[in-house]
Image: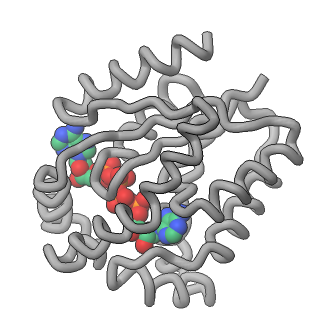
Amino acid sequence: MLFNLILFGPPGSGKGTQSQLIIDHYQFTHLSTGDMLRSEIERRTPLGLEAKKFMDRGALVPDEVVIAMISSRLDASTGTKGFIFDGFPRTTAQARALDKLLALKSTAIHLVLLMEVPEEELIKRLLLRGQTSGRSDDASEEIIRTRIAEYYNKTSPVADYYAQQHKLQAIQAVGTVEEVFNRIRQQIDKRFA
Ligand code: B4P
């Protein structure tokens, strides 16, 4: 049986960082819409050029763009133990679309980990990453605050969608990377042996 996990949380909560550790440990397939979009931008594809306009100002990319990207990646993936969705879904429309796409593969989401980090710590982490990442969306405190506002306005309601399905589990995502990973591992191991 496939095991499908969503890493959910505000920008800078460590979704990408923890995804790497989870993939190494469980050999799941990593689907990060942030990484996919950055790759499209780097290759200067029409999709990337369109997405860049939104990402540069800290806004979410339109639903239809990210849903189409995830759909084609899911179609192309075979023979995996499960999927980690990192940074997707970010709106309730994306969450509904994901449920439909997984149903076509006769599977579903099993666990949604909500990475909890106080806002000031998020800003500190992203400003620090911005010193070396070259990411336009980490470039200033103003853009970072826009991303956090987008999260509270558009993305955090998605947590209720999964709470109603009894799939949401909060994770205290402050502490060392290893400490956070140990908390995540406990939750996955309870459900996936
Ligand atoms: P993402 O690429 O998803 O990135 P993120 O939210 O900024 O970061 P993440 O939570 O992965 O944090 P990380 O591990 O890197 O999104 C970027 C943009 O793409 C969005 O703003 C949006 O425009 C667009 N986008 C993506 N998906 C979309 C979708 N579905 N719909 C619409 N638009 C979409 O950690 C951050 C920093 O903290 C790192 O420097 C890390 O080293 C550090 N860190 C991690 N864990 C730590 C810990 N325990 N202690 C201290 N520091 C830690």
Q: Is residue 11 left or right of residue 36?
A: left
The x and y percentages for residue 155 are 46, 60
Q: Residue at x 39, y 46 (%)?
A: 15
Q: Residue at x 88, y 47 (%)?
A: 104
Which corner quadrant of the figure contains ligand 1? bottom left
Q: Residue at x 45, y 66 (%)?
A: 154
The x and y percentages for residue 49 are 52, 89
Q: Is residue 180 left or right of residue 25?
A: left
- What number of labels is visible? 0
Vertical comparison of 37 with 35: above or below: below
Please tell me which residue lies in front, 114 or 61. 114
Vertical comparison of 86 with 81: above or below: below
The x and y percentages for residue 152 are 35, 62
The x and y percentages for residue 37 are 52, 71
Q: Is residue 27 left or right of residue 125?
A: right
Q: Residue at x 15, y 60 (%)?
A: 123
Q: Is residue 101 left or right of residue 4?
A: right
